[in-house]
Structures are given as C-alpha cells and as structure tokens.
Amino acid sequence: MSLWVFGYGSLLWNPGFEVAEQALARLEGWRRSFCMRSIHHRGWPEAPGLVLALDAAERAVCHGVALRAEPGTEAATLAYLRERELVSSAYLEERLAVTLTDGRAVEALVYVVDRAHEQYCGRLSLEAQARIIARAVGGRGPNREYLWNTADHLRALGIEDADLDWLSDRVAALSQTKDA
C-alpha cells in the first residue's frame, strides 16, 4: 500500500526520504501555525525556538504538498519520520484524508500538535512569534532559516500564507537590530 505524507513545513524543502510522487494538496480542519516550542531542532530547553505544527481549527484549510514515498521504502520512511518528528512527543501521528489538486483523495500520514503537551503555545501573537524566531538557534541551525525556507518554498509552490509572509518580513527586520 502507498504511503503518502502531508508536508506543510520543513517536509516541503527537506523531506528526507525518497519521493515517488509529489502533488499540491489541502487538508481541511487544520491550520499551519508556529504553535510548538522547539527544544531540539530550532532551540534548546533553556531557550526554545518555534516550529510549525498543524493546529485544529474549524473551517480552516491548510495547503501543502502530499508526498508519496518510493514503493518499497514505506517501512524505512515511516521509521525515519517517527525518529524525526516524534523526538519530543509534541506531535501526534495521524492518518487523515487530504485532497490532491487533481481531485484524488488520499490518506496521508500527518503530524499534528498535541495541545496537551507542554511545548504547545498556540496563543502567542505574531509579534511574540517573530521575536522568538529572530533569536532562537537549535541543533539544526537558526530558527529564522526554518521560517524563511518554509515561506520561500510555499511561495515557489504558489501557496499563499499571509502569517508566514508577515513573520518573514518582521523576523528580517528584527534580525537587523540588536534587541532581536
């Protein structure tokens, strides 16, 4: 059976597994949000950064990319994604229906935020998010690079995300000041 994965953040520009097929897709009932504190990849426990997660929201739609793992690599892909995404248990692994732009509906592996987890921070203002992202650095580098890579790839795919565009501009401005 095919393994589809829904990418909405770093999976857009760094899937880390062999992709046989890629298609623009939409996931209903969820929104992309910097609502998870990052204590490994883009920050540390004493100075957390922020990473994107899917946060449940009525009438929301998240546009992203559905990635189908190369046939024969499904077990290895799943093991890789679990090691990468479930490092702190702040994500929950779900299988949800996504709609591809060609009209196909597929079941995809999706990582959504666990609102009960201590790393959940869904009530931060965009300004607060920008200030954290501008200064945070973790094991995979500066938090701002994560934001900019994601925003750039969304734009290249023709996917609009007003919050990420605003955050990109604000973090760029803050990164040029000493008090970021």
Image (spheres, rainbow, N blue to C red):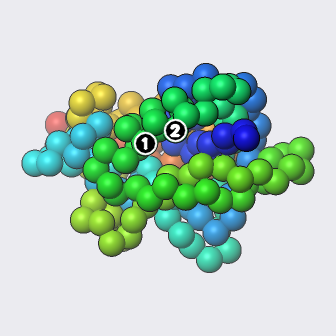
As shown in the figure, which amino acid type bears the numbered disc 2? Leu
Question: Is residue 143 positioned above or below 6 on the image?
Answer: above
Q: Provide the residue designation for mark 1.
A: 82
Residue 152, labelled with which disc? none
Would you say the residues marked 1 and 2 are in contact, meaning their CB atoms lie under 8 Å apart? yes
Question: Is residue 69 positioned above or below 26 on the image?
Answer: above
Q: Nearer the viewer, residue 66 or 86?
A: 86
Q: Quadrant of residue 94?
A: bottom right
Q: Residue at x 64, y 69 (%)?
A: 29
Question: Is residue 177 positioned above or below 94 on the image?
Answer: above
Q: Residue at x 30, y 28 (%)?
A: 140
Q: Is residue 126 visible?
A: no
The residue furthest bottom is: 58
Residue 14 in the image: x percent, y percent?
51, 27
Count residues near mark 2 (Cα–Cα under 10 Å), then give few for <14, some for 14-19, many for 20+: some
83 left or right, relative to 152:
left
Residue 6 in the image: x percent, y percent?
62, 46
Q: Provide the residue designation for mark 2.
A: 78
Question: Is residue 62 positioned above or below 147 on the image?
Answer: below
Q: Nearer the viewer, residue 97 or 161?
A: 97
As shown in the figure, which amino acid type bears the numbered disc 1? Arg
Q: Nearer the viewer, residue 150 or 179?
A: 150
Q: Residue at x 76, y 37 (%)?
A: 23
* Quarter of the rendering occupied by the N terminus: top right
The residue furthest left is: 46
Q: Dot 1: what SS?
A: helix
Q: Residue at x 37, y 47 (%)?
A: 86
Q: CA distance from mark 1 to mark 2?
A: 6 Å
